[in-house]
């Protein structure tokens, strides 16, 4: 459902080269919600940074793994 812009109340058609033409149907989800979902599906969405990082984890997200390049996370064990 969240992959079709029709639910935002807009019409799109590659055949007729129509991009987000406002339709007459009532929207089910907002266009902003649709855009956020699409960004998340493409992998371009960014989670907000936490403001309350503990002082124990000062290098969290700043140090990258040498093998995969992903940032280190932290937890107490």
Image (tube, rainbow, N blue to C red):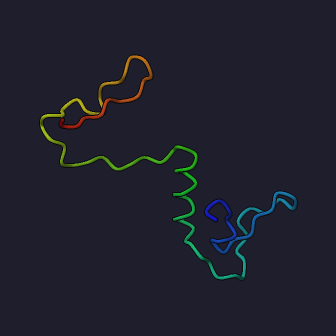
The residue that appears at 22% across and 29% down in the rendered structure is 59
The residue that appears at 18% across and 48% down in the rendered structure is 52
Furthest toward the left, the residue is: 55
Residue situated in front as seen by the camera: 66 or 6: 66
Residue 10, given in percent of the width and then of the height, sits at 69, 71
Furthest toward the top, the residue is: 66
Determine whether 49 is above or below 62 in the image.
Answer: below
Residue 36, given in percent of the width and then of the height, sits at 51, 57
Residue 64, given in percent of the width and then of the height, sits at 35, 24
Residue situated in front as seen by the camera: 35 or 69: 69
Q: Is residue 53 left or right of residue 4?
A: left
Determine whether 16 is above or below 70 in the image.
Answer: below
Determine whether 76 is above or below 15 in the image.
Answer: above
Q: Quadrant of the N terminus?
A: bottom right
Residue 43, given in percent of the width and then of the height, sits at 53, 43
Residue situated in front as seen by the camera: 53 or 67: 67
């Amino acid at each position: 459902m969240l992959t079709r812009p029709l639910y935002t109340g807009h019409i799109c058609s590659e055949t007729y080269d129509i991009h987000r033409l406002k339709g007459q149907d009532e929207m089910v989800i907002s266009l902003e919600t649709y855009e956020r979902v699409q960004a998340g599906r493409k992998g371009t969405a960014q989670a907000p940074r936490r403001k309350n990082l503990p002082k124990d984890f000062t290098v969290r997200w700043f140090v990258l793994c040498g093998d995969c390049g992903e940032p280190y996370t932290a937890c107490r064990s």
